[in-house]
Amino acid sequence: MKISNLRDAWDRWGKVDPMWAVLTAPDMTNRRWDPEEFFLTGEREIAEVLDHLQRLAIELRLGSALDFGCGVGRLTQALSKHFERVIGVDIAPSMLAKAQELSRAGPRIEFVLNQEDNLRVFEAGSFDFVYSNLTLQHMPPSLARVYLAEFARVLKGGGCLAFQLPSGRRRQPVAWKRLVRKVVPMPIIDGVVRWKVRRAAAERGLPVMEVYSVPKRDMVDFLQDRGLRVVVAEEREEVGSVWLSCWYFVTKPEVPLSSPTRSA
């Protein structure tokens, strides 16, 4: 998938059903999300994440935060209740237009359009906290890795990165599905699934919303190779999802590691 295709798909979602595209609750299609409840989900999520960081003994400076893939600002607004300055960045102009319309945090928030496969719009060491949820999973792993390397660059020494990315598909209890997975290589299965997703989207006249995964071990190695410390990588089974979601809580040392050490 080209980045232009990604941009076009999410710009269309921003025009068709922006809140549901951000948070795909089955009963909230066709613009059924109540804005107040929608933004409350963001406040609850950020509060839980900050509490979790505290339990992990990660000392978080509350200066500047980056919300990557901010959409209409669900998490950007929630972060602004805790940080002095928050920037939400997204690839879709329609999403950012809606985010500006719905923003209630005043000058603490800035929304930035970025349609490049980098974050050069931000200087190195710009943020104390970088956060991304339900975004990296919608782009090919090669592109997700590019942005993750950029997260490491824009993060301040002593800063924290927290993000979500599926690590694979959940085990299927149905016997014939387990058998298929033993016989057919996963790349072929994934290719068939994506073909079905594209066809279904085309039949309904909707943009494509694909999901990709990266094995946890591969992602941990990738992050450590960039001098980051992976405090924990937690796999979670989300209700109703076929994917095993993994949350990564990562810190950037004040002094760059000369030889990153990998952990199991």
Image (cartoon, rainbow, N blue to C red):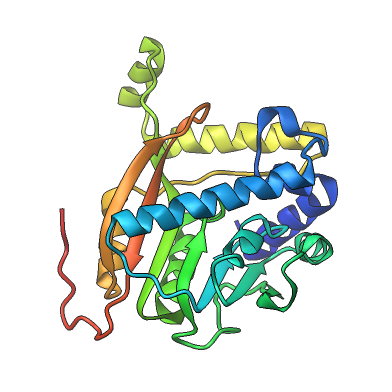
In percent of the image, x 44 and y 67: which residue is there?
148
**In the visual, does 77 lie left or right of 243?**
right
**In the visual, does 107 lie left or right of 84?**
right
**Residue 57 image point, x, y percent:** 27, 61
Looking at this view, is 29 or 102 the one in front? 102
**Residue 167 image point, x, y percent:** 38, 44
Looking at this view, is 165 or 206 the one in front? 165
One can see residue 137 in this view = no
The correct choice, above or below, for 227 with respect to 205 in the image is below
The correct choice, above or below, for 167 with respect to 4 in the image is above
Looking at this view, is 31 or 170 the one in front? 31
Looking at this view, is 126 or 37 the one in front? 37
- On-image quarter of the N terminus: bottom right
The correct choice, above or below, for 174 with respect to 77 in the image is above
**Residue 108 image point, x, y percent:** 66, 76
Quarter of the rendering containing residue 26: top right
In percent of the image, x 68 and y 66: which residue is there?
91
One can see residue 156 in this view = yes
The correct choice, above or below, for 155 with respect to 49 in the image is below
Quarter of the rendering containing residue 162: bottom left
User: How many discs mark residues in the rendered view?
Assistant: 0
In percent of the image, x 28 and y 83: which residue is there?
254
Q: Residue furthest top?
A: 175
**In the visual, does 73 lie left or right of 216?**
right
**Residue 128 image point, x, y percent:** 44, 76
